[in-house]
Amino acid sequence: MGLLSNNPSNERGPRKASTLLTRDQPMTANRGTTGEKLVLIVEDERDLAILLDYNLREAGYRTLLAHTGTEGLAKARAATPDLIILDLMLPEMSGTEVARHVRADKTLAAVPIVMLTAKADEVDQVVGLTVGADDYVTKPFSMKILMARVEAVFRRSQRSGRGSEQVLRLGGVSLDLETHEATVDGSPMAVTLTEFRLLTALIEADGRVLTRHALMRHAMGPGVTVTERTIDVHMTSIRRKMGPWGQHIKTVRGVGYRTVHELTPA
Ligand code: CA
């Protein structure tokens, strides 16, 4: 349904406390809920899995461990985690496959995924286009970086309902900021959290050009840096999902992106 809430249950209806938090509120405002968040770690390198598990628990998260792709998917389906840390190279079923199954599962579709990749050149494949991961970390990584990414993903998923206008529209595409549902011509549009954030920022800018850095800030939150290429990959994915309405997002060469309401004939 393109639902972007990461409620562990299937609970629909209006969001509660987190909806009231605005972008300007300090990060610490969300700290109280950390202990309730469940993170699924899918990693076949046992030492790394244990290290991830230890650090996440230290930070107040609940954790679940899986060492193969099949086990990871089964645990995701059984427990509906709030976030999945997913290694790309896994026995039995690759991280890519697991992510595809997660995105195709109604209950799990909106669960943020942070991918662990071995090589930087796997990143394009991982981010957005084929898999729909919300973020990635390239191995080897420091625990500090990984934890910062996890926190950033949660921060993004909690930032909602900030304006009085609850439904944003661009052509036949609608974004409901309250329910986090995206639709294209009335049908559900399966977008990742990052894509939802990027599209929200673009539509809110209402024709103003947003630089790739500005988009990064809107979608990833402060302090998280991704390459400009990553933003382009996300944008390509968003346009594809928007179908013909994708033409209403224009690339401004050398600068960034903007929306247009009217299409000028070529
Ligand atoms: Ca591995």
Image: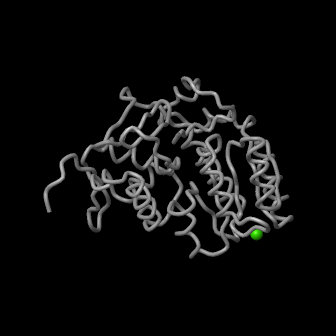
Q: Is residue 181 left or right of residue 138?
A: left
Q: In this view, does 127 lie above or below 167?
A: below
Percent x, y of residue 61: 76, 42
Q: In this view, does 90 lie above or below 11?
A: below
Percent x, y of residue 150: 65, 50
Q: Is residue 59 left or right of residue 215?
A: right
Percent x, y of residue 159: 52, 37
Which residue occupies the foreground of this view, 190 or 27? Answer: 190
Q: Is residue 45 above or below residue 194?
A: below
Seen at 65% across and 54% down, the residue is: 101
Seen at 58% across and 48% down, the residue is: 152
Q: Quadrant of the C terminus?
A: bottom left
Taking the image in four quarters, ligand 1 sits in the one at: bottom right
Seen at 29% across and 63% down, the residue is: 255
Q: In this view, does 157 lie to the left or right of 181?
A: right
Which residue occupies the foreground of this view, 177 or 164? Answer: 177
Q: Which residue lies furthest to the left in this view?
A: 265
